[in-house]
Image (cartoon, rainbow, N blue to C red):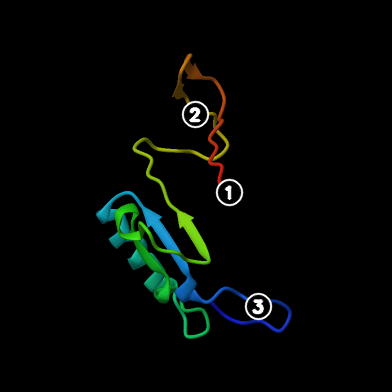
């Protein structure tokens, strides 16, 4: 990633994207290559499956997930839970 006088950015080589499926790995790699520039080298970001990252470290990890049904921003989604279905959009991903 580009270095800035006001803020140091994490190098692209230290950013990883984890995805559950090989097809999604290919798709994300294509998107990053399209958006890559000489100043912001998104092409250097490593994209791989969970299995390929096991036992390795990166400074920044982005976890990408898949949704099989269409999603519209701002509209509540019906999502299964232990008690049936949720009536409002409560998607959460917590990490440390």
Q: Distance between the residues labelled 2 and 3?
A: 38 Å
Q: Distance between the residues labelled 1 and 3?
A: 22 Å
Question: CB under 8 Å between callouts 1 and 3?
Answer: no
As helix, strand or loop, the secondary structure at mark 1 comes to loop
Residue drawn at x 36%, y 53% is 19
Question: Whole-percent x and y of residue 64?
Answer: 43, 51
Q: Is residue 36 left or right of residue 24?
A: right
Residue drawn at x 44%, y 76% is 36
Question: Whole-percent x and y of residue 12?
Answer: 48, 75
As helix, strand or loop, the secondary structure at mark 3 comes to loop
Q: In the image, which is nearer the foreground, mark 1 or mark 3?
A: 1
For this orientation, the residue located farthest to the top is 83
**Mark 1 or mark 3: which comes first in sequence?**
3
Residue drawn at x 36%, y 59% is 53
Graded by Cα atoms within 10 Å as few (under 14), some (14 to 19) or many (20 or more), the crowding at tag 1 reads: few
Q: Name the residue under label 3.
A: 8
Q: How far apart are marks 2 and 1 (CA)?
A: 26 Å
Question: CB under 8 Å between callouts 2 and 3?
Answer: no
Q: Name the residue under label 2.
A: 77
């Amino acid at each position: 990633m580009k270095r800035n006088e006001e803020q140091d950015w994490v190098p692209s080589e230290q950013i990883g994207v984890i995805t559950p499926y090989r097809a999604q790995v290919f798709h994300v790699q294509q998107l990053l290559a399209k958006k890559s520039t000489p100043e912001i080298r998104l092409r250097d970001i490593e994209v791989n499956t969970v299995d390929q990252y096991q036992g390795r470290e990166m400074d920044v990890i982005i976890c990408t997930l898949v949704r099989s049904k269409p999603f519209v921003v701002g509209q509540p989604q019906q999502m299964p839970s232990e008690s049936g279905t949720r009536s409002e959009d409560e998607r959460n991903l917590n990490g440390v």
